C-alpha cells in the first residue's frame, strides 16, 4: 500500500513534468539510431517521441505512451498525425498476450458505391482525394479511448492529452520539413478553407517559426474532459457537421455518434524461427506481408545475397502474387467475406509460386492499364514503442495524403482525412497509390476502406524481438518486409536494414519501383533481360523500428529518409 502511494506521488510529479513539457527549438537534435537500456520510443517527430518517453518515465506503459504520442503527433505533425483520421495498433504485452485495434475511418451512411463516378461512369479523381466528399468518419479518438480503457497502466487520460494541449496552445517551433510542406500546400489550404487557418500565413514559413493552434487546443481539452464524447458528440461533432454542410460532405451527427473502434484478432504467422504478429483486415498489411513471407520460405535468400538478381527476382514474384490477391480478396471483413485462413494457407501459397520461373519475370496475371503511382511524399505516421517491462506497441495512423482532404474543421482546428480514396471507386480503376480493387473494397455505408498500413511485432524464440511499421501507402508492406528480411535473412543490424535502399512491386502496374541505389547496374540489366520493367522513385516508406539486442538492450531506429524521425529511450 505504502509503496503504491509513493509510486503515485512519484508518478504525479513526473506527469506534471510531462505537462510542463519544455519545448526545445529546431534544429532539434534528431537521433535516428539509439540504444537504450530498458525503453524506447521511435516516432516521426522529436517532440512527439519525447512525449512518449516522458509518459513512460512517469510510470505509463507502452500503450499510454502510444496514446500520448498520437495526440502529440496530431499537433506537431499535422500532415499525418491526427484526430481527424484513423489507424491501427498492434500490441504485444510482456506476458505474450497479443491484440490489434482497428480505428480505421468508415464510409458515412450516405456514401454510395458510385459516389465518385460522373454521369459517364468515369471516376472523378479529385473528389475522393480533396475536399469534403473525400472524408471518412474519423476513428482516432475512439481508438485512443479504447486502447486506454483496455490497457492503460497510468489510468490518467488527462495526463495523456496534457502534452498535446500544451504544444497546441503555447505553440512549438516547426521543423524545416514542416515549413516546406506548409509552403507547398498553401494554395490548397486556401482553396479548401475560406476562413483563416493557422497553417496559412502571409510570409513564407521557415524553420523555427512558431505554430500555435488554439482551436485544436480547445478541441483537445474537450477530449481531455469528456473522452471520445468530446469529439463524437457535442461541440466538436456539431462543428464537424457544420463543416460538412459548408462543403457538401456527407458525415452526419449520427455517423459520428455511431463510430466504433474495434478490437480484432491479429494476423499471426511463422517465418523461419520468427513469429509475426500483424494487422488483419481492414488492413491488407498483415495478410499481404505473411503471404509474401510464406512464399519466400523456400528460397535461400541469405545464400543468394542482398539485392542480388536471385533475391530481387524471388521477392518481386512473391510480392506480385500477394498484391494480386489483395486486389481481389481483401476488404473490410465486417462487410465482405475475406478468406483469411485460405489466403494464409501454406499449400495455397506454394501453389501460387509453383509457376515461378527462375529465368523469367511472370507477367502480372491480368494486365490492366499501366497505372501511375502518385508521387506525393509519404505522409502517414508510425510509432514503435517498447516499455520498461517489455510491453510493445506498433501503431500507424494517417489522414491518407499530406494533410488529408486539406479541409480544416472550422473552429475545431484539425484536418480531416481523405481516406475515402482507399476504397475502390470503380473496379479496376487505381487509387492514388496505383492500387486496384473490386467488390471486396467497394464503397458501402459504414464500411472501412482497405489499408496497407502494417504495424507489426516480431517474436524470436517466443520472446519480443522487433517492433516496426511505416508510412508510405502501398510501399509500406514491402518496406516492412525488406526491413525484416534485412535482419532475419541478410544478417544486417537494424539500422542497416532500415536505411538500406528498397524496391517494390505491387502486381499492377507491372513494374519494379525502386530507389536508385537499391538495384545496381548489373542486376538492372539482368532484370531487363528477364522481362522486368524498372522505374526509379526518390524514396519509399519510412520505417520506424525497435529491436531487442542479444544483451536485452533496445535499439531504436528512425528512417534516415525523413529528417524528423527520432528515437528516444532510456
Ligand atoms: O491506409 C493506407 O494504406 C493509406 N491511406 C496510407 C497512406 C499513406 O501511407 C500516406 N503516404 N503516402
Image (cartoon, rainbow, N blue to C red):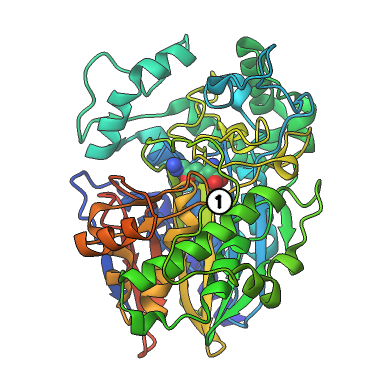
Residue 76: image quadrant is top left
Q: Position of residue 189 (x, y in %)?
A: 41, 19
Observer able to see residue 226: yes
State the SS at label 1. loop
Q: Is residue 39 above or below residue 246?
A: below
- Location of the C terminus by quadrant is bottom left
Q: In the image, is 62 to the left or to the right of 50?
A: right
Front residue (pair 304, 174) = 304
Observer able to see residue 469: no
Q: What residue is at 52 percent from the left and 46 percent from the top?
A: 508
- Location of the N terminus by quadrant is bottom right
> How many labels were placed on the picture?
1
Q: What residue is at 58 percent from the left and 77 percent from the top?
A: 4
- Distance from mark 1 CB to nearest ligand 1 atom below 8 Å: yes
Q: In the image, is 393 to the left or to the right of 249?
A: left
Q: What residue is at 32 percent from the left and 59 percent from the top?
A: 529
Q: Is residue 163 above or below residue 288?
A: above
Residue 347: image quadrant is bottom right
Q: Position of residue 178 (x, y in %)?
A: 30, 36
Mark 1 crowd level (few <14, some 14–19, many ≥20, 10 Å Cα):
many
Front residue (pair 193, 222) = 193
Q: Position of residue 22 (x, y in %)?
A: 30, 49
Front residue (pair 408, 427) = 427
Residue 171: image quadrant is top left
Q: Position of residue 410 (x, y in %)?
A: 54, 18
Q: What residue is at 21 percent from the left and 44 percent from the top?
A: 25
Q: Which residue is mark 1?
A: 452
Amino acid at each position: 500500500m505504502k509503496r503504491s502511494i509513493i509510486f503515485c506521488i512519484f508518478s504525479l510529479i513526473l506527469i506534471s513534468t510531462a505537462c510542463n513539457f519544455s519545448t526545445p527549438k529546431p534544429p532539434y537534435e534528431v537521433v535516428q539510431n539509439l540504444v537504450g537500456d530498458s525503453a524506447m520510443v521511435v516516432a516521426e517527430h522529436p517532440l512527439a517521441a519525447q512525449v512518449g518517453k516522458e509518459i513512460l518515465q512517469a510510470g505509463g506503459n507502452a500503450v499510454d505512451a502510444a496514446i500520448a504520442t498520437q495526440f502529440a503527433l496530431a499537433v506537431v505533425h499535422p500532415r499525418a498525425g491526427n484526430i481527424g483520421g484513423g489507424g491501427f495498433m498492434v500490441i504485444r504485452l510482456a506476458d505474450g498476450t497479443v491484440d490489434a485495434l482497428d480505428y480505421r475511418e468508415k464510409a458515412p451512411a450516405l456514401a454510395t458505391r458510385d459516389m465518385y463516378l460522373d454521369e459517364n461512369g468515369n471516376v472523378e479523381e479529385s473528389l475522393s482525394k480533396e475536399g469534403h466528399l473525400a472524408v471518412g468518419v474519423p476513428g482516432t479518438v475512439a481508438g485512443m479511448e479504447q486502447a486506454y480503457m483496455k490497457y492503460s497502466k497510468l489510468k490518467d487520460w488527462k495526463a495523456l492529452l496534457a502534452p498535446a494541449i500544451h504544444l497546441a496552445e503555447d505553440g512549438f517551433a516547426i521543423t524545416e520539413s514542416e515549413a516546406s510542406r506548409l509552403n507547398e500546400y498553401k494554395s490548397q489550404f486556401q482553396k479548401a478553407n475560406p476562413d483563416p487557418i493557422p497553417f496559412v500565413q502571409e510570409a513564407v514559413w521557415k524553420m523555427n517559426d512558431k505554430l500555435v493552434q488554439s482551436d485544436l487546443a480547445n478541441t483537445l481539452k474537450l477530449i481531455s474532459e469528456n473522452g471520445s464524447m468530446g469529439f463524437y458528440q457535442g461541440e466538436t461533432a456539431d462543428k464537424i457537421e457544420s463543416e460538412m454542410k459548408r462543403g457538401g460532405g456527407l458525415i452526419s451527427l449520427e455517423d459520428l455518434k455511431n463510430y466504433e473502434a474495434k478490437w480484432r484478432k491479429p494476423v499471426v504467422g511463422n517465418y523461419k524461427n520468427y513469429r509475426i504478429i500483424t494487422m488483419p483486415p481492414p488492413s491488407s498489411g498483415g495478410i499481404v506481408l505473411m503471404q509474401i513471407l510464406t512464399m519466400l520460405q523456400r528460397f535461400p535468400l541469405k545464400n543468394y545475397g542482398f539485392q542480388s538478381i536471385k533475391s530481387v527476382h524471388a521477392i518481386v514474384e512473391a510480392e506480385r502474387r500477394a498484391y494480386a490477391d489483395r486486389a481481389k480478396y481483401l476488404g473490410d471483413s465486417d462487410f465482405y467475406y475475406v478468406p483469411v485462413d485460405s489466403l494464409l494457407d501454406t499449400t495455397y501459397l506454394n501453389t501460387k509460386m509453383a509457376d515461378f520461373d527462375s529465368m523469367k519475370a511472370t507477367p502480372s496475371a491480368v494486365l490492366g492499364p499501366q497505372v501511375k503511382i502518385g508521387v506525393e511524399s509519404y505522409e502517414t505516421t508510425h510509432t514503435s514503442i517498447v516499455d520498461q517491462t517489455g510491453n510493445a506497441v506498433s501503431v500507424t495512423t494517417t489522414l491518407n495524403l499530406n494533410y488529408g482532404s486539406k479541409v480544416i474543421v472550422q473552429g475545431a482546428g484539425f484536418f480531416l482525412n481523405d481516406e475515402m480514396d482507399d476504397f475502390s471507386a470503380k473496379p479496376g480503376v487505381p487509387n492514388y497509390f496505383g492500387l486496384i480493387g473490386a467488390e471486396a473494397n467497394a464503397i458501402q455505408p459504414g464500411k472501412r476502406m482497405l489499408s496497407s498500413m502494417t504495424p507489426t511485432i516480431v517474436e524470436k524464440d517466443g520472446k519480443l524481438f522487433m517492433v516496426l511499421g511505416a508510412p508510405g501507402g502501398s510501399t509500406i508492406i514491402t518496406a516492412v518486409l525488406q526491413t525484416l528480411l534485412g535482419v532475419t535473412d541478410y544478417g544486417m543490424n537494424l539500422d542497416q536494414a532500415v536505411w538500406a535502399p528498397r524496391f517494390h512491386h505491387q502486381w499492377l502496374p507491372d513494374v519494379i519501383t525502386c530507389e536508385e541505389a537499391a538495384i545496381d547496374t548489373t542486376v538492372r540489366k539482368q532484370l531487363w533481360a528477364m522481362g522486368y520493367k524498372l522505374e526509379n522513385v526518390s524514396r519509399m516508406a519510412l520505417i520506424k523500428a525497435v529491436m531487442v539486442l542479444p544483451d536485452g538492450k533496445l535499439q531504436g531506429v528512425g528512417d534516415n529518409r525523413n529528417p524528423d524521425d527520432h528515437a528516444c529511450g532510456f
